[in-house]
């Protein structure tokens, strides 16, 4: 299947990066290089793009999409390790970083990846297919309490206990092997009258657990900011409330949130500022974009600028 993914908030993201022609930029979730192609178009021959992705299929698509350029490097890795990745290739600071979080259109539509609750494929959901943990191990191996907690925490699913209980009952009869089997169990566990697909929240929760998408976010944001040059920009696109909340909190901390009592005349807590939040409210898709790309519906863009004290 061809790797297709329409980049969301494209103009807003490119504007937010405030690209310098001779600068170095990192796309930590390059996908098919939709955003990256627009970044590299604005670079001179002295500029450079680094593309990182966990998905080897994405890197193949990115290489093809950027084949007319030679000022880029693609790396199979995780944006959570951005400091180590840049260190390994001899780069200390960059002018901008983009993180387009969540799952790509290709990964959803490619049924063999096991992300979609509308297909009938083996449970997988790994963005990086070289890792061991997959949805199969989560669904068939996690204890009931842990399953319930994950579904509630990452899927914000109020019927998490009932779903976890029914998963455990069914897997005692035989392992749950396919996306359809799991979706059918979930459908029987929630009220039929509920809007939207009954399995959507649970599949999201399991995907987040498999790919460890939320827990490292705070550190990833901080590491990314520390990798920026003065006045460098970090642009992060999120697609659900848990991601957006984590990014917002990390930005506030990086801006330097004083925790001293308000009656103290000066700060004694030692809060350090790494820069400033560019947009206090997240940037969302326009009505025009939503007409062309429904998957931009929940997208939110937050921008942070590194400011080094002189």
Image (cartoon, rainbow, N blue to C red):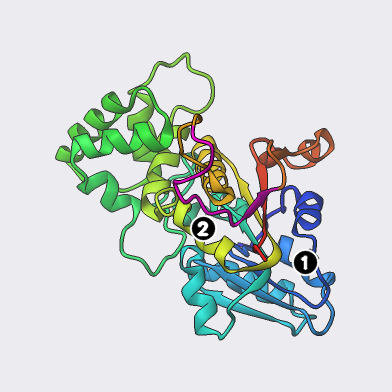
Q: Is residue 123 visible?
A: no
Q: What residue sits 47% from the left and 51% below the top?
A: 270
Q: Quadrant of the N terminus?
A: bottom right
Main secondary structure of the magenta stretch:
loop
Which quarter of the figure is the C terminus placed in?
A: bottom right
Q: Residue furthest left?
A: 172
Q: Which residue is mark 2?
A: 222
- Against 20, residue 176 (above or below) is above
- Give coordinates of residue 146: x percent, y percent: 23, 39
x 30%, y 48%: residue: 177
Local packing at callout 1 (Cα closer than 10 Å; few below 14, some 14-19, many 20+) is many
Name the residue that disc number 1 marks.
39
| Among the 4 quarters of the image, the one containing residue 143 | top left
Magenta extent: 264-277
Of residues 270 and 223, the one nearer the viewer is: 270
Residue drawn where x is 44% and y is 51% of the image:
213
Q: Position of residue 149 (x, y in %)?
A: 29, 35
Disc 2, SS: helix
Magenta stretch encompasses residue 273 = yes
- Measured Cα–Cα span from mark 1 to mark 2: 23 Å
Report the side of 202 relative to 281 (left or right). Answer: left
> Would you say residue 182 is visible in this rendering?
yes
What numbered label is drawn on residue 138?
none
> In the image as oriented, which residue stretches furthest toward the front?
265
Tell me if residue 144 is in the magenta stretch: no
Q: Nearer the viewer, residue 20 or 275?
A: 275
Q: Secondary structure at mark 1?
A: helix
**59, above or below 274, in the image:** below
């Amino acid at each position: 299947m061809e790797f297709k993914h329409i980049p969301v908030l494209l103009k807003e993201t490119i504007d937010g990066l405030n690209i310098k022609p001779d600068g170095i930029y990192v796309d930590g979730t390059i996908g098919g290089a939709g955003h990256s192609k627009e970044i590299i178009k604005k670079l001179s021959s002295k500029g450079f793009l680094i593309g990182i992705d966990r998905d080897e299929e994405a890197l193949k698509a990115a290489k093809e999409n950027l084949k007319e350029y030679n000022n880029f490097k693609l790396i199979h890795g995780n944006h959570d390790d951005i400091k180590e990745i840049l260190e390994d290739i001899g780069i200390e600071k960059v002018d901008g970083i983009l993180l387009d979080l969540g799952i790509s259109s290709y990964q959803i539509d490619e049924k063999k990846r096991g992300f979609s609750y509308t297909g009938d494929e083996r449970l997988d959901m790994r963005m990086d297919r070289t890792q061991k943990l997959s949805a199969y191990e989560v669904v068939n191996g996690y204890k009931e309490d842990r399953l319930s907690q994950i579904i509630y925490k990452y899927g914000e699913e109020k019927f998490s206990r009932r779903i976890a209980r029914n998963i455990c009952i069914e897997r005692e009869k035989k392992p749950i092997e396919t996306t359809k089997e799991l979706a059918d169990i979930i459908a029987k566990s929630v009220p039929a009258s509920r809007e939207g697909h009954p399995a959507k929240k649970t599949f999201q929760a399991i995907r987040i657990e498999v790919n460890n998408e939320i827990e490292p976010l705070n550190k990833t944001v901080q590491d990314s900011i520390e990798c920026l040059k003065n006045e460098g920009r970090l642009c992060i696109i999120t697609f659900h409330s848990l991601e957006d909340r984590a990014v917002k909190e990390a930005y506030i901390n990086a801006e330097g949130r004083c925790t001293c009592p308000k009656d103290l005349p000066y700060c004694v807590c030692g809060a350090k500022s790494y820069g400033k939040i560019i947009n206090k409210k997240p940037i969302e898709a326009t009505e025009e974009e939503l007409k062309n790309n429904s998957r931009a519906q929940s997208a939110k863009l937050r921008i942070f600028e590194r400011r080094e004290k002189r």
